[in-house]
Amino acid sequence: MKEIFIVGGGPAGVKLAQELRIMGFEGKIYLIEDRFLGGECTNVGCIPSKALFNFSKNFYKTKKLFNIELDLDVNNIYNSVRRVVNTIKKGIEDSLKKFEIDVVFDSAKFNNDKIILSNKEFNYEILALATGSYPVNILDLVKNDIKDNSRILDNRSLWGNSFKDFLNDLSKGSRILIVGGGYIGLETATLFSIFKKSLFYIFEIFDRILFNADKEISAELFKNLNKDNINIYTSTKLLEIKQNKNSYLVIFEREGKQEQLEVDYIVSAIGRKPNLPLDLITKKEINFDNYLRLKGLKKLIFALGDVTGLKMLAHKAEYQAKIVAKNIITYLSQNKLNYEYNLNIESLIPGVVFTIPQVAFYGLTEEEAKHKLNNNVIVKRAYFAANSRAIADLDRNGFIKVIYNDLGEILGAHMIGNDVDLLVSTLLSYHSEIVVYPHPTLAEILNELL
Ligand SMILES: Cc1cc2nc3c(=O)[nH]c(=O)nc-3n(C[C@H](O)[C@H](O)[C@H](O)COP(=O)(O)OP(=O)(O)OC[C@H]3O[C@@H](n4cnc5c(N)ncnc54)[C@H](O)[C@@H]3O)c2cc1C
């Protein structure tokens, strides 16, 4: 009987296992996971953050519509977020059972051509690495004398063991420094800013937040976020963290001047690194071809999801899982690989930032397109303020810009405003053959029908 080993039970690994069965693979599928099914996304990433986004969005909307003060019940928020995570995890477990996937809870290790599970070596013909990524540790990068790091958080501790205490402290009033003005840092500030007694600082080393986004969008988002209890410092470098008795003193450089700030929590959102199985791959990065097959290894090994780098997003991981599943099936039936994932597809993978207002985008930014095509681009803009539904929703904030080449082809789209997580899918479906719906959005329901 044929066997397939998948290492990593996050969105990439789970989707691959499911797709293989949907495509008719009848052999054994081993899914090996060393922490929790659902991976980073379900447990300490996309899902808890969007469960809290629901509170945040409705909090601001309700306050605005009814002009009332709202009491936040920490236990209710905590339990609700946990329930959402558990419901989704249960769905994953049930699906894996239904598809008769053998889940092995262990940390996979490798020895030459063998995989080691529970101290036993197994031969494999086909292996898929879906080992994900991990957050960069700020204390490894910044000078510090930290003895108590219990209030220096990354996404794993924030949404894991520290979540309840964090909520409690924020409800009483805390000072929080978020390091990194990328999507994870900005979402974190948005979500927790409902605790109005607390004060949030975001340090971004570049001269603008969301550095990879279109400049106009990042400026508009800055304008919307940098108010009330959120303070964003751009061109700001964190130099040192000093331990105080019950707080941290951070030394930073801002526009050439050194300053300091006392905070109760530090949330690190400075980036993620692919989780490379170093006993299998001796190089510093994973080297794979367009079929997502690792180069230079004798065996057939695929890589998918965050471990492949570039855009680290769950819907990309799942899309790559479909490509790998098709390649495995054609390899087994015709001894060849047929399906490619390349940079053109990567560019069509939308990014969504669940801030208020939301941001969504794909393709080239205006600056990139102008640079690439020698300024030969057309930029069209449309504003929410002129849209009847946005007016009815009392939310006229935002705009969409679409970048065309002189043949009228869309090179990129960038949007900021209410519900752009859905609008980005609408636009993609309109003109692109490859449509990857962002996660987690209602548009993903359509994946089951199309
Ligand atoms: C705060 C936050 C919010 C996010 N929000 C979104 C969002 O809204 N939308 C979105 O699309 N993406 C979001 N992401 C990104 C998303 O979580 C990742 O892109 C996604 O989880 C990648 O899936 P993956 O399967 O490649 O890896 P992972 O989810 O990291 O799963 C890999 C799994 O492999 C396991 N593993 C690793 N090595 C081994 C081994 N040797 N043996 C056994 N198991 C192993 C790991 O423990 C892990 O469970 C967010 C991330 C963070 C941190």
Image (cartoon, grey):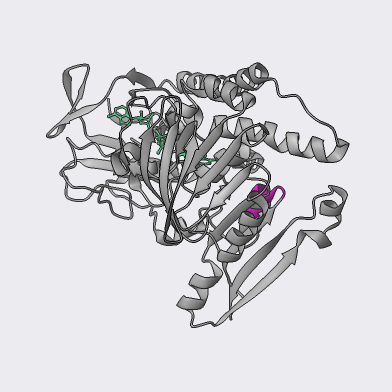
Residue 406 percent coordinates (x, y): 58, 81
Instruction: Give the vertical position of 388 relative to 68 (above or below).
Output: below
User: Quarter of the image containing the N terminus?
Assistant: top left
The magenta span reads 418-424
Residue 84 percent coordinates (x, y): 60, 23
Query: Who's the residue at 42% across and 20% down the image?
Result: 100
- Write down the quadrant of residue 65 in the picture: top right
Quarter holding ligand 1? top left
Instruction: Give the vertical position of 166 relative to 427 (above or below).
Output: above
Residue 185 showing in the rendered view: yes
Viewer-nearest residue: 42 or 75: 75
Considering every residue shown, the one lying at the far left of the view is 112
Instruction: Give the vertical position of 315 relative to 223 (above or below).
Output: above
Instruction: Give the vertical position of 213 relative to 333 (above or below).
Output: below
Query: Who's the residue at 50% across and 39% down the image?
Result: 177
Viewer-nearest residue: 250 or 204: 250
Dominant secondary structure of the residues highlighted in magenta in the image:
helix
- Write down the quadrant of residue 121 in the picture: top left
Residue 239 lies within the magenta run: no
Query: Who's the residue at 78% across and 28% down the image?
Result: 70
Query: Who's the residue at 47% across and 59% down the image?
Result: 347
- Number of marks in picture: 0
- Write down the quadrant of residue 447 in the picture: top right
Residue 321 percent coordinates (x, y): 42, 41
Residue 354 showing in the rendered view: no
Residue 143 percent coordinates (x, y): 30, 42
